[in-house]
Image: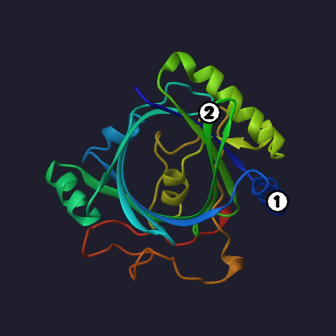
Amino acid sequence: MPIEAELKARVRDVPALLAALDEQAEAEKAVYRDRYFDSPDGSFASSGRELRIRTVETDAGVRHILTFKQPAVDAASGSKPEYETVVGDADTAEAIVLGLGYRTMIAFSKHCANYRWNEQDRDLLATVVTVPEIDGTFIELETITETENELVTALEVVRAALGRLGVSAGDLTTELYTDAVAAVLPGWTATSRSRPGPGRRWLPARSRSVGPKPCRGLGRHCGRRSPERGVARPRRWSSSRG
């Protein structure tokens, strides 16, 4: 059972972090276009499971990945068992998922810089992330472990690597991008699934003061109900929304 041992943090000093990462590996720029799915009654996502189709765009080309994540096996980090496979066509994969009775929950894009290196016999992947609808920059650092028994050791390696990159324990967050983006959707109301639990905090929505930039990569139905797929597309909202 592969487990994604991951820690996520807010980046306080972006130039310093990028300089430290450049000493570890060469950056690979990518755009992730993510579609998340849920059961009609919302019970699938509220249980902590995730079903996602991701389109990854890099200079090397485009690929599509279908991912299923089980509920977290470590509450402090939010690490989840993860299964994924490459699919040939994202729209066809989505049609299959919808045909099985799931519904599109949310869609958004992540602008990423990926760094890969090996440390203590573990392959590490650091991803520096910005999301147009969310204020700030984040780093995700992960390694894959095959058993839950190895998770504690794997997270220690990840935590130590983050420390050397200048990321402190106080910068860590387990809040989900899906929740943060959903919080800026028109007509959104808080639910038990989307409220941050103990030790969690909101990833703040991007302030309107940055200006009315378009929702990059989310199509022309930004902030409205998409007639093609019936999925609410995000728009920016003030971080004072609560």
Sequence-first tag of 1 and 2: 1
In the image, taking residue 201 as reference, residue 49 lies left or right, namely left
The residue shown at (80%, 46%) is 165
| Label 1 residue SS | helix
Above or below: residue 87 compared with residue 176 = below
Determine whether 85 is above or below 59 in the image: above
Tag 2 secondary structure? strand
Q: Position of residue 12 (x, y in %)?
A: 81, 55
Q: Is residue 214 above or below residue 7?
A: below
- Residue 177 in the image: above or below residue 58: above
Q: Position of residue 234 (x, y in %)?
A: 47, 69
Which residue is tagged 1?
A: 19
Residue on which disc 2 sits: 122
Image quarter of the N terminus: top left
What scheme was used to colour the molecule? rainbow
For mark 1, does the 10 Å Cα neighbourhood hold few (<14), some (14 to 19), or many (20 or more) residues? few
When asked about the image quadrant of residue 70, the answer is top left
Residue 65, picture quadrant: bottom left
Q: Residue at x 50, y 45 (%)?
A: 194
Disc 1 marks which amino acid?
Ala
Point out the frontmost of discs 1 and 2.
Answer: 2
The quadrant of the rendering that contains the C terminus is bottom right
Q: Quadrant of residue 160?
A: top right
**Hey, what amino acid is under mark 2?**
Arg
Q: Looking at the image, which is closer to me, 35 or 181?
A: 35
Instruction: State the residue at coordinates (23%, 49%).
Output: 102
Q: Is residue 163 left or right of residue 40?
A: right
